Image (tube, grey):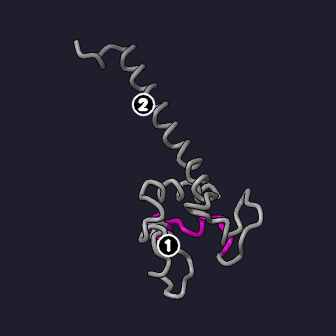
Amino acid sequence: MHLLKMPHARCIAIISLSLLLNHAFASSPLEGKKIAFDRKKGNCIACHAMEDGDMPGNIGPPLTSMRLRFPNRTTLKAQIWDASSNNPLSVMPPFGKHQILSSPELEQLIDYLYTL
């Protein structure tokens, strides 16, 4: 008999998958917040006012209502990857282009920014 045809095995598999996915999605914004405040990584607070930030910079716009401002995740990712592609005069570091952030770190950062 196939294992997943047994009702209790199916329930255990569903619960396990659910817990795994919940942990992955719940931890991503938390990891993204760590990146945003890490001086060696995102360091967003150096230039942007943001929730929970002490002594924020004012070079860049405040990081608020991010999902409304960037409803297309790809657009926000492109902005963080290399802001100079949209604005050649931008002073924002090209976090992706210069490999300051890895692709998974960039995704975690965006997950966090979408909570603001």
Quadrant position of residue 113: bottom right
Query: Can you name the residue that lies furthest to the bottom here?
Result: 89
- Check the picture and name the quadrant holding the C terminus: bottom right
From the viewer's perspective, tell me whether residue 89 is left or right of residue 46: left
77, 90: nearer the viewer: 90
| Coordinates of residue 108 in the picture (x, y in percent) | 51, 53
Are the residues at dot 2 and dot 1 in contact (C-beta closer than 8 Å)? Answer: no
Residue under the image location 53 percent in, 88 percent down: 89
In the rendered structure, which amino acid carries the disc numbered 1?
Gln
What crowding class fits label 1: few (fewer than 14 Cα within 10 Å), some (14-19), or many (20 or more)? some
Q: Is residue 35 above or below residue 9?
A: below
As for residue 66 lying within the magenta part, the answer is yes
Quadrant position of residue 26: top right
Query: Can you name the residue that lies furthest to the right here?
Result: 55
| Coordinates of residue 40 in the picture (x, y in percent) | 57, 61
Query: Can you name the residue that lies furthest to the front here?
Result: 40
As for residue 41 lying within the magenta part, the answer is no
The image shows a total of numbered marks equal to: 2
Magenta-highlighted residues: 61-76
From the viewer's perspective, tell me whether residue 15 is left or right of residue 44: left
Q: Secondary structure at mark 2?
A: helix
Q: Is residue 22 above or below residue 28?
A: above
In the rendered structure, which amino acid carries the disc numbered 2?
Leu
Looking at the rendered structure, which numbered label has been put on residue 79?
Answer: 1
Residue under the image location 30 percent in, 19 percent down: 4
List the residue tagged with mark 2: 17
Q: Secondary structure at mark 1?
A: helix
Front tag of 2 and 1: 1
